Image (cartoon, rainbow, N blue to C red):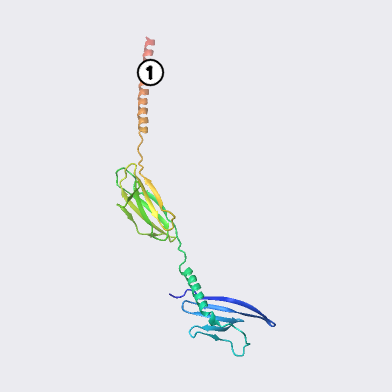
Amino acid sequence: MEALLVLALMMVCAVHSQPAGFDRYGWIIGCDETSTRVSFSYNGEIAEYFDYEEKQTVMTLPDFADPIVIADLSKDAYSAQEFCKDTLAVINDAYMNPPEELEPPWTSIYTKSDVKLKTKNTLLCHVTDFFPPPVRVSWTKNDLNVTEGATLSPYYQNSDGTLSVFSTLSFTPEEGDVYSCTVEHRALEQPQTRIWDVQVEQSSVFPSVVCVVGVCLGVIGAAAGIFLIFRANALCSCGLT
C-alpha cells in the first residue's frame, strides 16, 4: 500500500550566538513507508546526511565553507529511523482508518390492514435512519420468540445516506395477544423494542339502548296525547248536553 504521508520532523533546533549574528542548526528526520532520511542542517542548508545503503555519514558542505563541528549521524540514524517509521504508521492509521460514523435506527410498528379478530393480517416493523448495516430484527408474541412468518426486506438508502429496512410478520389477531419488534444495531447501547397489542374497537350497546328508550318514550307520549284529546272531546260533549 502506498504511503499516505511523508513525515518530516525537526528533532533538535539550536541557536548559536556569533559576533556576526546567529547560526541555526538541527536534526531533520524524514521518512515514508520505504525509506528514511536523517540529516543535519546548518543555516538552512543540509550539512550532512546518513546514507543507509552505504551505512555512513555523507558531508554535503563545500570545501571552502567555514569549518563547523557536527555530530556523527551514524550513532543515532537507526534509532531515528525506527522512531520515524513508528510515528508514520500511527499517522497513516489515523487517516486511513478514521472512527466509523454510526447513526442509530428509529423504529415504528403498525399493521398493514385494519384489525379484525381471527382475520389474518400483517405487522410491519419499519427501521430507518441507521448506518452502517446491518441491523438485526426479531419478533415476539406474548414474550415468546417468533420466526415463522417473519421476513426482512433489502436495505433502502435514504436521501441523507442513511438506510431503511422493513420486517414483516404474518399473524392472526386474537384478543389479549401482545407482539414486539426488537432491533439491534451497533450504534445502540441496548436493543430498541416496540410493542403492539391487539385492540379491536367493539361497537357499544349504549346507543342502541338509548334509541330503544327514546322510541318507547315517544310511543308513550303519543298515546298519552291521544288519550288527553279524546278525554277533552268527551268533556266538551257532556257540557253541551
Vertical position of residue 203 compared to residue 72: above or below: above
Q: Give how far across and how far down residue 155 sits, in percent.
A: 37, 59
Q: Give how far across and how far down residue 56 sits, in percent.
A: 52, 85
Q: Is the N terminus in the top left, top right, bottom left or bottom right quadrant?
A: bottom left
Q: Nearer the viewer, residue 238 or 166?
A: 166
Please name the amino acid that badge 1 sits on.
Leu
Q: Give how far across and how far down residue 227 sits, in percent.
A: 36, 18
Q: Check disc 1: other Cα within 10 Å, few if <14, some if 14-19, many if 20+.
A: few
Vertical position of residue 78 compared to residue 136: above or below: below
| Residue at 37% over, 32% down | 206
Circle 1: element type: helix
Vertical position of residue 178 compared to residue 27: above or below: above
Numbered circles on residues, count? 1
Residue 13: image quadrant is: bottom right
Q: Nearer the viewer, residue 44 or 66?
A: 66
Residue 133: image quadrant is: bottom left
Q: Give how far across and how far down residue 208 sits, in percent.
A: 35, 32
| Residue at 40% over, 59% down | 163
| Residue at 38% over, 18% down | 228
Instruction: Quickly name the residue at label 1.
Output: 228
The residue furthest right is 19
The residue furthest front is 75
